[in-house]
Each structure stands twice: as structure tokens, then as C-alpha cells.
Image (cartoon, helix red, strand yellow):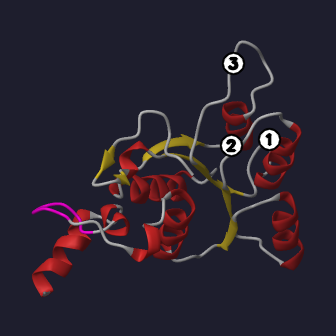
Amino acid sequence: MQPAKGAAVKNGCSVTSQYRVLVAEDDDEMRALQAWWLRVDGYEVIECEHGIDLLNRICPVCPPLKPEKFDLIVSDIRMFGYTGLDVLEEMQRCETEFPPMILITAFGDKKIHQQARILGAATMFDKLFDLNELMARIHELVLPRPLSGIEVEGTLGEPASCADAHRPESERLGEQERK
């Protein structure tokens, strides 16, 4: 997947600060936490507090609005207006390409997981989930993989590989101190 328009490239790796992630969550604290983690990791984050706003941003029905471009959507399932599943279903009706969508729910059962897969969800997490696992999945979905596991030579202060480029600097620095 290519980064959003205007993405910078460093050492042949896309820089995450140019990746746009849409976070849709009706719980203010949960939305703020997810957005904070993504921003700390260098992503540009746009927040929605309900399904109506989410759908209007990616598949607007009222001219002259145009769909916004995102590299990934992270959405709660149960929200006001449209659920995350409703949005996935509507995305299939629109005549445009959509980014991967991660769904999160506190009410996940086998039926909901199956419905999410059928509608094309990239992944589904049940609350309470590990934020590190969410971030790892996000990196898998929006970052280019290094070719054949080849690491890019880094200079002082720069990460040694594409994967390292997208981890928080404090985490990388801690590893360097231990070496």
C-alpha cells in the first residue's frame, strides 16, 4: 500500500508521519487513547465520534463533499448512527477504493466476528485488547515490508530498518542503550 499523498521517504522507507489513520470511537477516553498512541508513533490521526461522521468522511452522499483519503480506518462497532459493520457494508456500495478497516468491539461473539470477516474487515479486536498488538497489526497493514528482510543502512540517529523507522524513538533508544 502506498502512503497518503505527500508521503516522505527516508532511507527508502516511507515515514509514518505521512500515513493518515481515521479513528472512529464513541467513547471519548478510548478514542483519545487510540489517537494518542498513533500520534506518538508518528501517524496523522483524524478522529470521529460516531458512525455518521465516519461514513461522511469516507463515502459522502452530499455534493460537493468528496471522500477523504486514509491509509487505514480503526473503528468501534457499536456507535451512534452507523455501526462499524454498517460502514463496512456501505463502503462496498460506494464506487471507490477503501483502505483496510480494523474493527474493535466490547460485544464480540462468533457471529459478529464472522460478519466482520464477510464484510471485509482486516482484523477485529475485542475490548480489552493489548494496544501493542493493535499497533503491530496497524504496522502490518500500512507499512511496506523490507525486500527479502534486507535492512537499510542507517546513519547515527536514524533507524536501521524500515520496521524500526515506525517504532517510537524512545523504544529504539532504549534498545540501543542495552546493546
Counting from the top left corner in percent of width and height, residue 41 is at 36, 58
Is residue 156 magenta-colored?
yes
Residue ranking furthest to the top: 64
Taking depth in this image into account, of 110 and 122 the one nearest to the observer is 122
Up the image or down, 131 lies above or below 48; here it is: below
Is residue 40 found left or right of 172 in the rendered image?
Answer: right
Amino acid, disc 2 = His
Which region is colored magenta?
154-160
Counting from the top left corner in percent of width and height, residue 23 is at 57, 49
Q: Main secondary structure of the magenta part?
A: loop
Residue at the location (35% across, 41% down)?
Answer: 8
Structural distance between the alpha carbons of marks 3 and 2? 18 Å
Q: Nearer the viewer, mark 3 or mark 2?
A: 3
Q: Residues within 10 Å of mark 1 (few under 14, many from 20)?
A: some
* Element carrying mark 1: loop
Residue at the location (53% across, 69% down)?
Answer: 134
Q: Which residue is mark 2?
A: 50
Q: Which residue is mark 1?
A: 81
Amino acid, disc 1 = Gly
Structural distance between the alpha carbons of marks 1 and 3? 19 Å
Q: Nearer the viewer, mark 1 or mark 3?
A: 3
In the picture, the quarter occupied by the C terminus is: bottom left
Q: Earlier in the sequence, mark 2 or mark 1?
A: 2
